[in-house]
Amino acid sequence: MTIALSSVALVDDVAAELGSQEVVDSLETVTSNASSAMQWALDEALWHLRNRVPPIADSDLADVTELKMIVVYGAIARLYRQNITTGMGDDVSSAKHDIYNKMFSQRLSSLRPTLAASMVAAPASIALHRR
């Protein structure tokens, strides 16, 4: 199962976090736009879940909107990084990249997604404690 980006977050969510659509437009480059940055962030989040022990597949997630802020923060960090690497960024862009990248990493490492009913284990069972 592939998760549709539109079911997790929208470009409007990125614009809301940054304050306006104009800020998003100013960060977009020829090689990177908000949608591609959001897709990258979603792919990173899903990769992180697949590499946990035990792994969590896309189909195991009961509520994909729990990934929303991870995708938003990751997309903003990616946009700032692209902005810096293309030579358009400055010290403020670098500081904002660091802030959003840290927020992305913290949300990703603390993610405890709600799993589908097929993944529910009995309390105090080995399967429960392995997650």
Image (cartoon, rainbow, N blue to C red):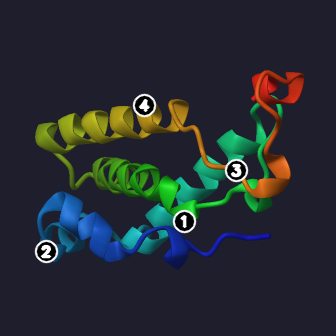
In the drawing, does residue 51 fall left or right of residue 25? right
In the image, which is nearer the foreground, mark 1 or mark 4? 4
* Residue 33 visible within the image: no
Residue 104: give its label. none
Residue identified by numbered label 1: 39
In the drawing, does residue 25 fall left or right of residue 86? left
Q: Residue at x 74, y 58 (%)?
A: 58
In the image, which is nearer the foreground, mark 3 or mark 2? 3
* Cα–Cα gap, marks 3 and 4: 20 Å
Residue identified by numbered label 4: 106
Label 2 SS: helix
Q: Mark 2: few, some, or many residues within 10 Å (few <14, many ≥20)?
A: few
In the image, which is nearer the foreground, mark 3 or mark 4? 3
Q: Residue at x 29, y 65 (%)?
A: 14
Badge 4 amino acid: Gln
Residue identified by numbered label 3: 115
Tell me where residue 33 appears, x and y as whole percent: 39, 71
Badge 1 amino acid: Gln
* Cα–Cα gap, marks 3 and 2: 37 Å
